[in-house]
Image (cartoon, rainbow, N blue to C red):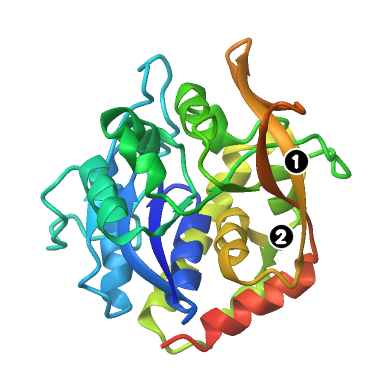
Amino acid sequence: MIPILLDTDIGTDVDDAIALTLLLASPELDLRAVTSVSGDVRLRARIAKKLLTLAGRTGIPVAAGVAEPVLRQRRFLWLGHEGRGIVDGDESLPLAEAHGVDVLIDTVMRERPHVVAIGPLTNLAVAIMKTPTILEAIPHLTVMGGAFGVRDDATVPMVDYNLGSDPEAALVVLSAGIPTTLVPLDVTWKVRLKEAELARLRTATSPLVQVVCNAMEIWWPLHRAVFAGQGAYPHDVVAFLHDPLTVAAVFHRSFLTMTERRLRAQIRDGLFQFVDDEAGAQFEVVEDVDAPAFVEFLIDRIQRFG
């Protein structure tokens, strides 16, 4: 089993919740801690704790991390629906007393987990600045982020949210020399869950899976409304699977095409970007995905969970 620390902005896009469900449903992975980042980090942490509780995994510590980008010059996305259908306002969901950055540092230093980051990299950046020796204790980092311009779909955004929402944090983390796998937006954009597949997931007996299915139905109309000007999506899509694919990249790669690239992280005109550079650090990058195969894998794992 691979020990995992999950750093997440769970609660806005439903894909974080699906990713957490896949992680819990995969016996290859051993979740040691969850840290939340961006906006109302306490509510995000409570969402994660509720999902863990529904899965019977109440012993996993969940901690609220950093709420704002490191330079506080931007604002993270917050739409107002976060927690709807998952967390009741007065529900008792005990979180770790320590700050999320301290939980991240402590967990990494003691347990040497594989770190999976599926939100802005702010917690990790602050952890590195606070305790630089953490760099030697992270065996591997898998990040949902990056956009490399492979555009066979005109609707793919040019900049991904996770790295673009706090570019200074991304620069700190991705210039630090941690062995890193990147799961970029132009690949994750290809993996989508549709209404017919949601109906298949509805046959699961797990309370966790049912709540996540509800969350998909809440999220998708909001996604269409918020991103209406950025391209038309098939009418039957209920979720993009950015973060679940990132979790799968840790342990199950039969549907992935991987490559090695030497990259340099930089900020240009306020935007984070990677540039190819022979003198840059070597990154493992997901280059392509067999989307139908991954979706079938995801459904199989989640449908049988619990």
Q: Position of residue 289 (x, y in %)?
A: 78, 61
Density class for disc 1 (Cα within 10 Å; few <14, some 14-19, many ≥20) is some
Mark 2 residue element: loop
Instruction: Please give the residue where the numbered disc 1 appears in the rendered image.
Output: 261
Give the crowd class for mark 2: few <14, some 14-19, many >=20 residues within 10 Å. many
Q: Position of residue 257 (x, y in %)?
A: 79, 60
Q: Position of residue 26 (x, y in %)?
A: 49, 78
Relative side of 69 to 151, left or right: left
* Identity of the residue drawn at 26% across and 63% down: 49
> Is residue 185 found left or right of 20 in the rendered image?
right
Q: Tell which residue pokes out farthest to the right in this image.
A: 152
Residue beneath the point at 14% across and 47% down: 98
- The part of the image, by quadrant, that contains residue 212 is bottom left
Q: Please state which amino acid type lies under the numbered disc 2.
A: Val
The vertical placement of 23 against 131, above or below, is: below
Camera-nearest residue between 37 and 125: 125
Residue 27, percent from left and from top = 46, 82
- Provide the secondary structure element on which disc 1 rests: strand
Picture layout, residue 91 above or below residue 59: above
Please say if 241 is above or below 125: below
Look at 27% across and 66% down and name the residue there: 50
Whether 79 is drawn above or below 15: the answer is above
Which amino acid, by three-letter code, is at mark 1? Arg
Q: Nearer the viewer, residue 180 or 184?
A: 180
Quarter of the picture containing the C terminus is bottom left
The residue indicated by pointer 2 is: 191
